[in-house]
Image (cartoon, rainbow, N blue to C red):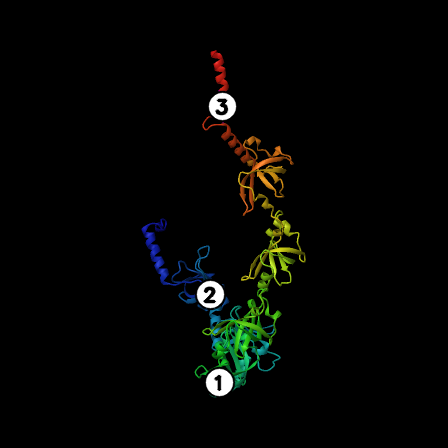
């Protein structure tokens, strides 16, 4: 296999090109069910060939036996598998026949459910609340409630276990992979008149009175008519307003009038509508104006808000974010009840999308506007600490239902933020200054230290290289801690900035209490940053002395200049 040692060789590149071309012809995707051909069988495993894969995947024979496919373990046989990974960390292809069968079984159940068809199954065991049913074709397990086993009470169902019989699917939960079936519906339907003859009784346009809600799915709601036939009201035929799921509108057992809109004699299905029993409310939506206030009726409460009616049939959603100015995503259950009449402002009318948006909070004065009028930015206001976390306090401001955000950095000019924060608890009253009011985001920022004079104002009339007098408060290996005279601020003079000469740059020379002069090496009032340096002061003083007492390039500033003068004097004395 020398051809593979050098991947840059023309032969290797040609092989790679041919392989990639072959792979591109066969669209292999993870998560898909594909067909694999059995090429080899051992005591424990079977090997599959799947066109487009670089290696042969392997399946445990026990897995095939577990799902009842031992009769398929024959060389040359083709079986469906789920492609879980094209290549794992070991470079192997991972497939599963068991998962493929489960997925295929679920698709068949889903198709039967949507088409309202019965399935073949057998009761395998009893469980709490009912029995477990196995789908004959796919061996998928389903649950049949005790109430759906028969149309009459049964004390003993042992004679039904293991017998193949018909079941109706009454509920599918795709998210959890659960299916609920009913034997009772099949038993009941067998006792009724032939379904085709029942459908002959109906025609398009008929009004069906008191149809009972029997079940629903993501695409519509099923109703039972006269205890003899089930009809479907599609999601789009429930209401003129948008409906995400039938359970937003209906409850099992409710009675509603229906209008027949379609009859399919081949599939033996009847389609009905509820919304077509009433005129389209959007035909006179022009009676309503955007920006005006109206009374609406709460008809249903959800986790994300409540559904309201402007008039019968014309419903809209009041989202939780539009209920209150100050409480974000508040639960509508805490404020409203079904049947309440509340004031709302129409914020949007979209005729194309048939949507009306409303807001309850717009009928109430914005407390942030009221706060800004009475206490503009820069004002002081009394408050109470209502909550706190590891970096901030929340302060209820005066009589307003508003919590101001007080960051730990705004508690004190001098103290450390995390230590200052520990001084406060819920219920403490304090006065704060309003720093910012953001009406759009409904936020207020306040400060406590802003009530006091900023110690950094001491540096307002100072500039770089200015000389100031400081008092040494302590010293360590890092340098000197000093306080400028007349200021409460404390600064560190680093060890490297104590003196020009390295030998003199020793913090141990100072014991505390000394008054010394230093220069301002860095000054940024916006960033509240100041650096001090004794070394800089010495350099400035030396430079000043040189400029006063020496001429440029005279050499007088060198330490050996005096020695040179003395040698010249001695030479003159000898000559004499």
- Check disc 2 and report its element: helix, strand or loop: helix
Residue 99 falls left or right of residue 15: right
The magenta segment is 555-564
Residue 158 x/y as whole percent: 59, 77
Residue 527 vs 199, above or below: the answer is above
Q: Nearer the viewer, residue 206 or 81?
A: 206
Q: Which residue is mark 3?
A: 561
Residue 219 x/y as whole percent: 49, 75
Could you say which quadrant of the image residue 214 lies in? bottom right
Q: Is residue 69 visible?
A: no
Q: Are marks 1 and 2 in contact (CB under 8 Å)?
A: no
Question: Disc 2 versus disc 3: distance between alpha carbons?
Answer: 98 Å
Q: Which residue is mark 2?
A: 97
Q: Which residue is mark 1?
A: 195
Residue 196 vs 327, above or below: the answer is below
Residue 124 falls left or right of residue 77: right
């Amino acid at each position: 296999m020398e051809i593979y040692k050098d991947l840059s060789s023309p032969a290797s590149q040609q092989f790679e090109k041919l392989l990639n071309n072959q792979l591109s012809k066969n669209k292999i995707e993870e998560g898909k069910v594909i067909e694999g051909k059995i090429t080899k069988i051992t005591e424990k495993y079977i090997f599959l060939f799947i066109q487009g894969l670089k290696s042969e995947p392997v399946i445990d024979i026990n897995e095939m036996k577990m799902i009842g496919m031992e009769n398929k373990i024959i060389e040359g046989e083709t079986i469906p598998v789920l492609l879980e990974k094209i290549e794992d960390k070991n470079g192997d292809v991972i497939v599963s026949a068991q998962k493929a069968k489960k997925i295929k079984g679920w698709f068949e159940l889903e198709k039967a459910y949507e088409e309202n068809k019965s399935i073949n199954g057998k009761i395998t065991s009893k469980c709490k609340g009912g029995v477990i049913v196995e789908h004959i074709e796919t061996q998928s397990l389903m649950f049949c409630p005790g109430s759906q086993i028969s149309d009459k009470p049964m004390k003993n169902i042992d004679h039904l276990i293991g017998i193949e019989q018909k079941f109706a699917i009454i509920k599918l939960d795709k998210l959890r992979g659960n299916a609920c079936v009913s034997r009772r519906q099949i038993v009941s339907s067998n006792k009724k008149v032939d379904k085709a003859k029942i459908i002959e009784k109906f025609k398009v346009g008929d009004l069906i009175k008191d149809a009972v809600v029997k079940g629903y799915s993501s695409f519509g709601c099923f109703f039972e008519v006269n205890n003899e036939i089930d009809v479907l009201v599609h999601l789009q035929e429930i209401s003129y307003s948008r409906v995400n799921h039938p359970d937003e509108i209906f409850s099992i057992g409710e009675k509603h009038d229906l209008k027949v809109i379609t009859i399919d004699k081949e599939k033996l299905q009847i389609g009905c509508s509820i919304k077509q029993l009433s005129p389209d409310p959007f035909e006179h939506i022009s009676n309503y104006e955007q920006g005006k206030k109206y009374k609406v009726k709460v008809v249903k409460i959800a986790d994300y808000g409540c559904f309201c009616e402007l008039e019968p049939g014309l419903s809209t959603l009041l989202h939780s974010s539009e209920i209150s100015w100050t409480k974000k995503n508040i639960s509508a259950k805490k404020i409203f009840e079904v049947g309440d009449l509340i004031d709302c402002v129409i914020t949007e009318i979209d005729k194309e999308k048939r949507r009306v948006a409303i807001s309850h909070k717009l009928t109430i004065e914005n407390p942030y506007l009221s706060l800004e009028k009475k206490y503009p930015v820069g004002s002081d206001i009394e408050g109470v600490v209502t909550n706190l976390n590891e970096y901030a306090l929340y302060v209820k401001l005066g009589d307003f239902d508003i919590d101001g955000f007080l960051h730990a950095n705004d508690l004190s000019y001098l103290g450390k933020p995390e230590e200052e924060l520990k001084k406060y608890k819920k219920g403490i009253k304090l006065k704060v200054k309003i720093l910012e009011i953001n009406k759009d985001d409904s936020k207020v920022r306040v400060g406590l230290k802003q009530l006091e004079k900023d110690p950094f104002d001491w540096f307002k009339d100072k500039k770089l290289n200015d000389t100031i007098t400081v008092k040494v408060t302590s010293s360590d290996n890092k340098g000197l801690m000093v306080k400028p005279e007349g200021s409460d601020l404390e600064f560190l003079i680093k060890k490297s900035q104590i003196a020009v000469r390295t030998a003199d740059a020793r913090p141990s020379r100072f014991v505390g209490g000394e008054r010394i002069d230093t220069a301002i090496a860095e000054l940024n009032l916006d960033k509240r940053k100041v650096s001090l340096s004794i070394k800089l002061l010495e350099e400035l003083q030396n430079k000043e002395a040189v400029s006063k007492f020496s001429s440029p390039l005279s050499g007088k500033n060198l330490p050996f200049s005096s020695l040179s003068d003395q040698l010249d004097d001695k030479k003159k004395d000898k000559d004499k």
